Image: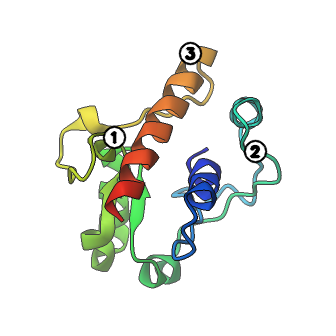
Amino acid sequence: MAERMFRKMIEKSGRRDISVSSASLLDMKGASADPKAVDLLVEKGFDGRGHKSRLLTEELTAETDMILVMEQQHREMIVEKYPDAAEKIFLLKPFTTGCTWPDSDHTNDIGDPHKRSSYHYRLCFAEIYMSIEGLLKCI
């Protein structure tokens, strides 16, 4: 959801200097997006269709300026695998309040709604949306 939301919000802001892509920590072999997430994105006016997963690689971490993650655990997993990327990995949620850089507090996590209720998908959507709004003010 975050990639699709971020892309449209960048477009609406008129920024042409930011590109966004997503990658997974698990090799999901090009799997499509979660149907509940797709439906919610479409309902909220975002393009949710056509997503195919791809694995995060060392090359991707090297060529990016910033890596945004939903959970502290994700950050730790990336740092363990690609230590050179550590300084450019950030939790997304702290940006909700503006340019507040994340710490190790797990209350800064945006929980994965997969296989949970519609409430959890909507909560995740709202947290991502507000975080991206804040992030766009910082970059």
| Numbered badge on residue 48 | 2
Query: Position of 11 compared to 138: left or right?
Result: right
Q: Secondary structure at mark 3?
A: helix
Q: Which residue is nearer to you in this view: 139 or 42? A: 139
In the rendered structure, which amino acid carries the disc numbered 2?
Answer: Gly
Residue identified by numbered label 1: 96
Q: Could you classify mark 3 by the number of other residues whose Cα lies within 10 Å: few (under 14), some (14-19), or many (20 or more)?
A: few
Using the numbered discs, state the Cα–Cα distance from disc 1 to disc 2 in whole angstroms: 22 Å
Q: Residue furthest right?
A: 50
Residue at position x 55%, y 28% in the image: 113
Residue 102 % position (x, y)? 22, 50
Does residue 123 lie above or below 4 as drawn? Answer: above
Circle nearer the N terminus (2, 3): 2
- Decide if residue 117 is in sight here: no
Name the quadrant of the C terminus: bottom left
In the rendered structure, which amino acid carries the disc numbered 3?
Answer: Tyr
Residue identified by numbered label 3: 119
Residue 43 % position (x, y)? 75, 29
Q: Secondary structure at mark 1?
A: helix
Q: Which residue is nearer to you in this view: 109 or 74? A: 109
Residue 4 % position (x, y)? 65, 51
In the rendered structure, which amino acid carries the disc numbered 1?
Answer: Thr
Using the numbered discs, state the Cα–Cα distance from disc 3 to disc 1 in whole angstroms: 19 Å
Circle nearer the N terminus (1, 2): 2
Q: Residue furthest front?
A: 14
Query: Position of 48 compared to 57: left or right?
Result: right
Query: Position of 3 compared to 94: left or right?
Result: right
Circle nearer the N terminus (3, 1): 1
Check whether the beta carbons of the residues at disc 1 and disc 2 lie within 8 A of each other. Answer: no
Q: Which residue is nearer to you in this view: 94 or 67? A: 94
Residue at position x 41%, y 53% in the image: 69
